[in-house]
Amino acid sequence: MSPNDARTENFGVPWEESYGYVQAIKRGDSIYVSGQLANDGADLVAMAPLDDEGQIADAGNMADQMRQAYRNADVLLRRFGASLDDVAEEVIYTLDIDAAFQAAGPVRKAAYGRADPQVASTLVGATRLAIPGQLVEIKMVARV
């Protein structure tokens, strides 16, 4: 398959151009969704408060950030005629494993609409994410 056979989607947010990437790309029967974060358009939502040194002061917004990341992924997937039901794999990157693990169960189950989401999932602790106040980023691969 040549690159010309790929289809891409973006949100039109500034960091797509500054970093140089697409939000999602479909090649063949696979859709690759770049790491989604808590943004609504170019507006960042539910960002964690930072201390005087720029470090996360409280991870209490973890569930809100996760919900927004899943909403963003769902929007992108629907542009390809797919949905979260088509996700085969997800990787959740987080600054706080304990807070993410506590939030992930209820948020993931609601996002996928079932008590046993049928998706391979990996939770990874990170030392930093791209945007100050960002607690979580979720990337996915869907098959259609």
Image (cartoon, rainbow, N blue to C red):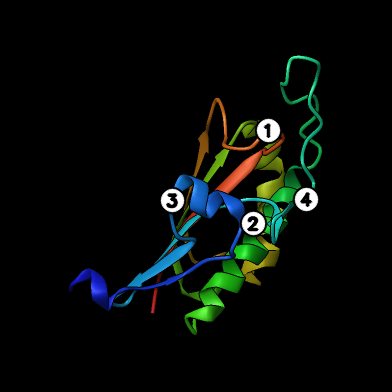
What is the x, y in percent for residue 59?
Answer: 76, 33
Badge 2 crowding class, 10 Å Cα cut-off, few under 14, some 14 to 19, many 20 or more, is: many
Q: Quadrant of the N terminus?
A: bottom left
Badge 4 crowding class, 10 Å Cα cut-off, few under 14, some 14 to 19, many 20 or more, is: some
List the residue tagged with mark 1.
Answer: 132
The numbered disc on residue 20 is 3
Query: Upstream in the sequence, badge 3 or badge 4?
Result: 3
Query: What amino acid is found at the position of numbered circle 1 in the picture?
Result: Pro
Query: Upstream in the sequence, badge 1 or badge 2?
Result: 2
The numbered disc on residue 45 is 4
Query: Upstream in the sequence, badge 1 or badge 3?
Result: 3
Query: What amino acid is found at the position of numbered circle 3 in the picture?
Result: Gly
Of labels 1 and 2, the one closer to you: 1
Query: What amino acid is found at the position of numbered circle 2 in the picture?
Result: Ala
Of labels 3 and 4, the one closer to you: 3
List the residue tagged with mark 2.
Answer: 69
